[in-house]
Amino acid sequence: MPASSAGFGAHHEWGTLREVVIGISPAEDFVIFEEESMRWMVEDVRDFCRRNAGRRLIDIDADWAKRCERQVDALAELVAREGVVVHRPERLRDPERTFLAPNGEGAQIFPRDGMIVIADHVIDASLRLLCRQRERYGLRPVIQQMVQQRGARWSSVPLGSPGCVDGPFLEGGDVLLNGREIYVAISGCASDLAGIDWLQALLGDGYRVIPVALKSNVLHLDCCLSLVKPGLLIWCPEKFIDGLPNALRDWDKIAVSAAEANLLATNALILEPGRVVVDSGNPRAIGELRQRGIDVIPIDFDGPIGYGGGLRCAHHPLLRESVLH
């Protein structure tokens, strides 16, 4: 059935984007965080976080904080110009701002991870990083609107343990949609098998939720894989343990290096099949896409990428037009 029949939902990564939530990044709100599970960060950024945890980014590097704000707002403006309805999270206030984050650690740039949309389900995710648990409160007004006006079905993954030992953990950056196959990464940094089991039980026998094994220093699946359109993907082979899921192995593949993947060359915003927004700092990936006839819109996004999140991380589809077979 078309995802548009209920005015909500998504079945694939590449369906025409009609409605979306894009993060916010008020420069004065970004507070640096550091937790044990952050081994996925490149070493210089991890050191920066260790030294400055609990401090506002604007007080340490005002240019970086303001660049994040400016670039996220520019993304929202670009997507709106493309005719997509754009929602933004509600800015957190106390006590939500400091829930599990005494200094207000974190930001609201990356709505991809705190929610998951599959078919007509909208899911509150369970994240390993404690300080990110409260991001759901900024997303809640959007989710409630989708439930009340669009017929979305709302569920919440049970929260994992505060010590990040016992799940379930299930994060939106790990979840890629390919019709009735849903891919979820397992690296030890984010989602886990208990989260996969929970998702399979929610979706039922009509879906196969397939675990994808990644190296232990990879945060999310979208840090090393993008399904650009049917038959075309971008991936970083070095970050996979057992390769791609079987259904993707015959696709045309653009391979990127670990260094390119760390600059989030696989992390794009797909407007429709054959039309994507890509960070301008990944020229080789842009060239490879254009050689295959993809209309690429480059945009500067190095501010958020410097903190580990790219263009896919910064948005979550609420409505993609595609057909589930």
Image (tube, rainbow, N blue to C red):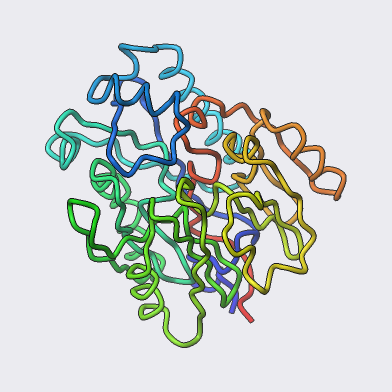
Q: Is residue 286 left or right of residue 305?
A: right
Foreground residue among 201 and 239: 239
Image label count: 0
- Estimate the x, y position of residue 47 in percent, counting from the top left: 37, 24
At 53% across and 67% down in the image, what residue appears?
183
- Image quadrant holding the N terminus, namely bottom right
Vertical position of residue 28 compared to residue 240: above or below: above
Q: Quadrant of residue 55?
A: top left
Image height of 40 relative to 251, above or below: above
Residue 246: percent from left, percent from top = 66, 73
**Left or right: 71 as drawn, with respect to 260:** left
Quadrant of res 50: top left
Residue at 50%, 81% in the rendered image: 207
Residue 88 percent across, percent down from the top left:
40, 41
Rendering coords of residue 308 (x, y %): 47, 35
Residue drawn 37% across the image and 21% down it: 48
Q: Residue furthest bottom?
A: 205
Task: Name the residue located 72 percent from the left edge and 59 percent from the top edge.
Answer: 229
178 or 316: nearer the viewer? 178
Using the image as rendered, state which of residue 164 and residue 171 is in the foreground: 164
Q: Quadrant of the C terminus?
A: bottom right
Q: Is residue 84 left or right of residue 249?
A: left
Horizontal relation, residue 97 to residue 11: left or right: left
